[in-house]
Image (spheres, helix red, strand yellow):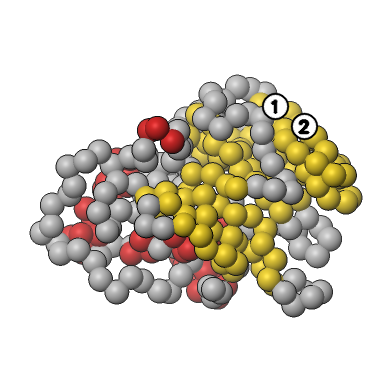
Amino acid sequence: MRLSLRIVTVLLAAAGVLAACGGPDPAPTGSAPSASPAADQPLPTAPLTPDPATGHLMLWPFADVAAAQAWQQAHRDGGSQPWHLDAEATALGFAQGYLGFAEIDQVTSTEGGDAEAWIGVGYTSPDSGRQVTVAVLHLVRVGTGEDAPWEVVGSRDEYLTVETPAYGAAATWPMTVGGMITGVDESLHVRVLSPAGPVGEFCCAPAGGEKSPWQVTVPRQAERGGDLTVVVWTGGHVADVERFAITGVRG
């Protein structure tokens, strides 16, 4: 499936990046589910949160459970921002709108079911004309019912990984970030983000080899709470961002 880059650019430019209050932006898609619940349908009584047993953090588009619940009620009242019901649109919006990777303009793969999904995002190679998967994002639905919204909670990685800090760990500063990489003549860029804005950044570290370890130290540039996204990426051969991986930590 290919989502329109023109639609992505227009909607993201109009909306901006997710605000600290947890109110998400419109996503980069022009399609919407064909049906939405009636306006007078009550909210589910079950807690609106990813299953605590899985240890998922809420990375994007909702900063917390309350924000997800507020959207669900707004959607039931008036059909607000139906893209939250589309896992592919949410994944692409995360890559383009939250991480700022404008070149990533396509969904390349979809796996999963009604409650959990793994969505590949990427671009078309200018050299081969083939789709390239840059990352596979992990999403879960927050809450219950057919109108439970999707949330990015992590990524499934192979050639580039983030193993330090551990997923769900408390953030410490300066932050040591590391993992494994397979590649040739790579340059690693690391950024730490919160829904309110950037927290820290490091650029850049040379890397390469077969499952070679990498490690950098990221200084804190702003104090922000909540769940934080740690993203590492590499590129420069045929695109600015050719691989990326994420993990989540508690701010």
Q: Position of residue 178 (x, y in %)?
A: 72, 33
Whichever of callouts 1 and 2 sits on the residue coming sooner in the sequence is 1
Question: Which structural element holds mark 1?
Answer: strand
- Residue at 29 percent across and 46 percent down: it is 143
Q: Is 210 situated left or right of 144 in this image?
A: right
Question: Which structural element holds mark 2?
Answer: strand
Q: Position of residue 208 (x, y in %)?
A: 86, 45
* Residue 226 position by quadrant: top left
Tag 2 residue? 215
Q: Is 173 situated left or right of 77 in this image?
A: right
- Residue at 27 percent across and 58 percent down: it is 146
Q: Is 13 situated left or right of 158 in this image?
A: left
- Residue 12 seen: no
The three-letter amino acid code for the residue at tag 1 is Thr
Q: Is 215 situated left or right of 194 in this image?
A: right
Tag 1 residue? 176
Residue situated furthest left in the rendering: 40
Q: Position of residue 33 (x, y in %)?
A: 33, 70
Q: Nearer the viewer, residue 61 or 159?
A: 159
Task: Determine which of the numbered discs, if any, sits on residue 226 in the image.
Answer: none
Which quarter of the rendered picture does the N terminus lie within? bottom right
Q: Residues within 10 Å of mark 1 (few under 14, many from 20)?
A: some
Q: Position of residue 52 (x, y in %)?
A: 38, 33
Measure the C-alpha gap from mark 1 to mark 2: 7 Å
Q: Nearer the viewer, residue 191 or 208?
A: 208
* Residue 181 position by quadrant: top right
Do callouts 1 and 2 mark residues in contact (Cβ within 8 Å)?
yes
**How many numbered discs sit on the rendered protein?**
2
The three-letter amino acid code for the residue at tag 2 is Gln
| Up-down relation of residue 110 to residue 165 (above or below) | below
- Residue at 47 percent across and 30 percent down: it is 225
